[in-house]
Image (tube, rainbow, N blue to C red):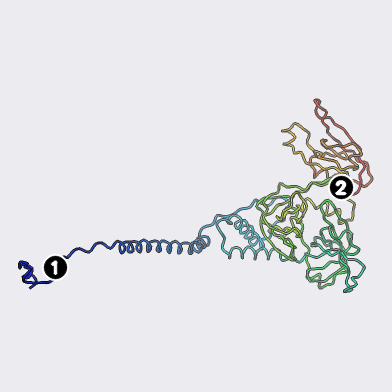
Amino acid sequence: MGKDRDNRPDTDDDYQFMKETIKKRPPDTRRIFCKAAAIVGGGALFGVSAAAAFFLSAPRIQELSIRTGKKEDVKLAAPTPGEAAETEEGEDETSDFREAAVSSAADTVTGVPMEEYEKIYSQALEISREPRKALVNVSGVSDSADLLDDSLLSYGDMEGIIFLESGPDFYILTESEEIEDAEKLQITFADSSTAEGFLCKTDSRTGLAVVRVPSMEISEETRQEISVANLSDSYSLQQAKPVIAIGSPTGDKDGVLYGVVTAVSSKLAVADAEFNLMTTDMQGSPEGSGVLLDASGDVVGIITKKGEGETNIIRALSVTQLRSLIETMSNGEAIRYLGIHGVSITQAQAKGLGIPQGVYVNRVDNASPAMTAGIQSGDIITGMAGKSVKSMQSYTTILQKQKTGDKVKVAVSRQNGEEGYGEMEFEVSVEEK
């Protein structure tokens, strides 16, 4: 019907309807733009969602990779002669601690699961369990009482560690800073019991002291609770060697940290001696103190505030180099003194520089026996008391075997212009420090 109507000729007389022209609707650009924007937005939203999902799942994937992936074995250098051998029973535990501690340091960038940190710390706690029983608190007190609470006036207190039981006495290594002028010493053991201690000797150069406690002053119950720490007899100083800090390394009592030795090149140069410093990656406190243990639980270092520069990094004096000094202080013997500050000249350095091997004198203390005798900076000490001096260590050992008041002959090489080094000998009076 519509088709017939369309074929009929149009006449104005037949119909009076309004004529309409059908045109195509113009494109709706706004609608097209909205659809395009929706498609682009949806794509962007999908991309962001995918990225977020990957970001959130990446740590889990990495954790599973660390757990299930094959890990390269970590091997440490073989023990040096004199280092205490591990028992078969404790070998696996200490080996695991060494491997885990070094691995955690190496994997700091890639991340280590919390379970690994917990495992390492648990092993550190187990290794330090017995040595921590040897920790004591050494307080300097006065005979005078505080009028407010009728308690003894305190000079201060320091961390200490029992390192020897000999005959009727226990011996404690501690710091001398707060106790050397105290009238009395009060020792507080791991079980909180107390006993009176007696100062054997202090060394102002290293800031160390040895305190003696008679066994009869300690109850049988306390003896069962405390322990005696073992001083390491190993002379090896190894970088990346796992260590455990106990005592109050962060300023809090009975603290435990673990880390690795990062450097062994620093030295503490004092009058008539030189000691190696072990620098670790552990953060401590300026008020902190304590000792470093190796993976066997032996004491390998005494935490010190001595050395150049102010830093919170924990550093320690090598205990193997302190053994002679500790023995001297334990016996209450005087520390021999000439007043020489020097550094060792190795055989290789001597050959390369064309100078004698021995101890190069950096400086001499004012009014010291060495200065009085005529020894001066720039001299190279090659002998003492008829024995050869090859290093600062040998110089110190020979000196400490002399008696106070003795006249000791010191052989010196001194440069004499173009003539090179000439040999000289000085007679020096040994004094006490």
Secondary element at tag 2:
helix
Asked where in the image residue 229 lies, by quadrant, the reply is bottom right
Q: Is residue 316 above or below residue 155?
A: above
Residue type beneath disc 1: Lys
Task: Please say if 376 is above or below 32.
Answer: above
Report x, y in % for residue 379. 83, 35
Point 32% across, 64% down: residue: 35
Estimate the x, y position of residue 407 in percent, counting from the top left: 93, 41
Q: Nearer the viewer, mark 1 or mark 2?
A: 1
Residue at the far front: name it.
13
Residue receiving disc 2: 400
Which residue is label 1 attached to? Answer: 19
Task: Determine whether, in the image, residue 226 is placed left or right of residue 405.
Answer: left
**Which quadrant holds residue 349?**
top right
Towards the viewer: 137 or 225: 137
Q: Is disc 1 placed on a helix, strand or loop?
A: loop
Q: In the rendered structure, which disc, 1 or 2, sits on the residue that comes first in sequence? A: 1
Residue 9 in view (yes/no)? yes
In the image, is residue 209 above or below residue 264? below
Q: Kindly identify the residue that appears in the image at 62 percent across and 60 percent down.
A: 96
Q: Quadrant of residue 353?
A: top right
